Image (cartoon, grey):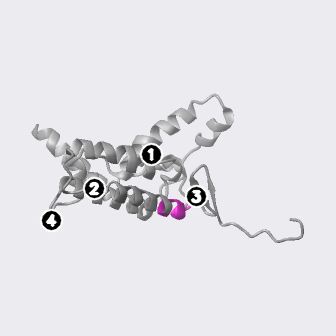
Amino acid sequence: MLDSNIPWQWNYKYLGVTLDKNLHFRDHIERIRNTALFYKARLGAMLGRKSKLSRRNKRTIYKMCIRMVMTYASPVFAHAAPKALHRLQVIQNKFCRTATDAHWCVRNSILPRDLELPTISKYIMKDTSKPFFDIAGSHSNALLRAAVDYQPPHPTHLIRRPLNVLTDPPDALTAAVESLNDVNDRHD
């Protein structure tokens, strides 16, 4: 352009989502992870172990400030690699541990249940993606309907599409939390 080279961009930020050339969303997840850790550090005095706030209030602050940052545009990157999504789950696990002042020997599968928080993968995959695809599938715009109206590839296929997240089995932590919830429901 005007006799000057334009450098090639491999990543591009659009509407707050960092897109890379293969749509792996590693850079996006790393960016939102760092942003969530920044907010968690700033709110540390209120969410920490020695805070006088109730667990309910800590949970509300977490859901409104930190989880919203981590799950913005989550239906777009919900089909990212489980290892990348696990990095977001680590932030939630650390919050749960400090908010409940849990001892080191308490399992991470018990903490979200105590605070009544779904795991990040369940929240992203099921709680936000399903309504998103339902609304997009019944939208009046034909192009939008066509974008979500496709048959997901076979589960062993290497290419994952966003709609696959609705049919994927839960990860190990989500399965453990759900089984603990089922046991508690039977004993109540």
Which numbered disc, 1 or 4, marks the residue that appears first in the sequence?
A: 4
Mark 1 residue type: Leu
For label 4, count other residues whose C-alpha is less than 10 Å away and answer few (under 14), some (14-19) or many (20+).
few
Q: Nearer the viewer, mark 1 or mark 2?
A: 2
Which numbered disc, 1 or 2, marks the residue that appears first in the sequence?
A: 2
At horizontal 59% and vertical 43% (from top left) the residue drawn is 150
Q: How far from the left and from the top, in percent, is residue 9?
A: 69, 66
Q: Is residue 137 left or right of residue 188?
A: right
Mark 3 residue type: Thr
Q: Which mark is drawn over residue 105? A: 4
Q: Is residue 140 left or right of residue 70?
A: right
Mark 2 residue type: Ala
Which numbered disc, 1 or 3, marks the residue that appears first in the sequence?
A: 3
In this figure, which residue is indicated by the disc labeled 1?
166
At horizontal 43% and vertical 52% (from top left) the residue drawn is 70
Taking the view exactly as shown, the residue that stands out farthest to the left is 187
For label 1, count other residues whose C-alpha is less than 10 Å away and answer few (under 14), some (14-19) or many (20+).
some
At horizontal 50% and vertical 61% (from top left) the residue drawn is 31
Q: Which mark is drawn over residue 18? A: 3
Marks 2/3: CA–CA distance: 31 Å
Regarding residue 89, the answer to whether it shows in the image is no
Label 4: which secondary element: loop
Looking at the image, do the residues carrying marks 2 and 3 touch, with CB atoms under 8 Å apart?
Answer: no
Label 2: which secondary element: helix
